[in-house]
Amino acid sequence: MNHALVWFRLDLRVADNPALAQAVAAHDAVTPVFIWAPEEETPWAPGGASRWWLHQSLRAFQADLAARNSRLILRRGPTADVLMTLAAETGARAVYWNRRYEPAMIARDREIQRRFREAGLAAEGFPGNLLYEPGTVANREGKPFRVFTAFWRAWRSMPAPALSLDAPTRLPSPERWPDSLPLADLALEPKIDWAAGLRETWQPGEAGALQQLNAFLRDHVDAYTAERDRPDHEGTSRLSPHLHFGEISARQVWHALSPHPNAEPYLRQIAWREFAYHLLFHFPQTPNEALRPEFRRFPWQLDPRMLHAWTRGRTGYPFVDAGMRELWRTGWMHNRVRMVTASFLVKHLLIPWQEGARWFWDTLVDADLANNTLGWQWCAGCGADAAPYFRIFNPVLQGEKFDPAGAYVRRWIPELARLPDAWIHKPAPREVLAAAGVELGRTYPAQVVDHQAARERALAALAGIVKSGGHPIA
């Protein structure tokens, strides 16, 4: 039989899957395969929350394929060796996949392509995870953008994205299926079950992604501009983990939303995602190093005690702590709160942004190397875009503005639930605390740092970079 392998990674869907569509169109038999090889992604192998999501997504994908007379073959790496072995076992003459853009994944794809072609077999990657390939958007000099607004203008001038591909109703099966590991053998789920909150919050898989998209279109897109910064309301799409795992494509989201008259603000968020990949592709060192080299001179202070207080939501700043507890419970955090919590770590505590990036990497269900890197470098002031490097979010004012009645804080910090609205985000007088049953240092921590003193310390550190010859916004 004219047989092909389709190697699935972060594209766990049947609809709008270019690699799968090519295999179905050009071959008499298709064997879908997923290979677990986290060591090949070190130091950015999937964290705990991502592994939990991956397990659920693979299980849903297995069911989707079974409904189309197919199977998902599960194997453990090394990836290149496994694919070569599967090609020999099945007689496949080709392997197809949808591209990834992390530096280690680009190198791995090239090696697999080389080995297959040397063996006289076809090996081809497809653009299935972004609207536009990272290397196709450039400024007039052909160089990468470092400011989003300029990137956005160029990105919007590109030809309209191609229409989404329909899902095949049936996949051509091989005469004999190769052996597959049981999903449990990949050991993706935690040995100690800490994922109850994740199960309550999410429905991983292609069906869950489409359900989430439809809910956003039905209930939230009209008010997105007004509601997107309010963590106390359900005003965002919550599509980020589904997009990361490829349970829905950016193209599907784009075409579902673009006819809507109020969709432009959300479409800009899709473009921010693409900008993150643009930066990672052109500046592959940035997951570990600041894009702006002058920040190598920044006087970071890695204090394990302060870092622990931040990770556990015990800083004494309710808006920050609520976000960190939401993350711990659900594997997700509202974007406005992500910015405030990240700013607090790097500006108030002067803890290196890489420490925060690593924590988010392990605890977010939507942990994505490009987006995680962009977000943390933006908040630290050491990355791309024109955001003032000296911006320091005031967590009290941010809470009062975006959670004015304290509903978000009360949800995640129930020990503060009885505080009046006027005092939910800031230190309250002793009598107010007593009436609400709050005892600082016992039922809820006192502030680990004074905002004004921390702000002045951060500004002095940033000014030191400029005085020493650097200029963080140049």
Image (cartoon, rainbow, N blue to C red):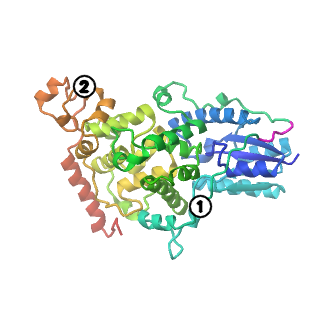
Q: Tell me where residue 450 appears, x and y as whole percent.
A: 20, 44
Q: Secondary structure at mark 1?
A: loop
Image position of 264 with respect to 184: above or below: below
Q: Dividing the picture into quarters, in which one does residue 61 lie? A: top right
**Quadrant location of the C terminus in the rendered image:** bottom left
Residue 101 image point, x, y percent: 59, 55
Q: Which residue is mark 2?
A: 443
Residue 118: where, in percent of width, then height? 81, 58
> Is residue 28 on the magenta stretch?
no
Look at the image and tell me in which quarter the N terminus lies: top right
When the figure is inspected, residue 87 is found, relative to residue 314, above or below; the finding is: below
Most common secondary structure along the magenta stretch: loop
Q: Residue furthest bottom?
A: 141
Give the residue displayed 31% in from the left and 61% down from the top.
388
Crowdedness of circle 1 by 10 Å Cα count: few (<14), some, many (20+)? some
Is residue 373 or residue 397 the one in the foreground? 397
Amino acid type assigned to the residue bearing label 2 in the image: Thr
Instruction: Measure the alpha-carbon separation of dots 1 and 2.
Output: 51 Å
To which residue does mark 1 refer?
133
Residue at the spot 35% in from the left edge and 45% down from the top edge = 227
Q: Residue 426: horizontal and vertical position, in percent?
A: 19, 38
Q: Is residue 302 visible?
A: no
Bounds of the magenta segment = 171-175
Left or right: residue 191 compared with residue 126: left
**Between tags 1 and 2, which lies in front?**
1
Tell which circle, 1 or 2, labels the residue nearer the N-terminal end. Answer: 1
Residue plotted at (29% across, 33% down) = 407
Q: Is residue 173 magenta?
A: yes
Check disc 1 and give the amino acid type: Glu
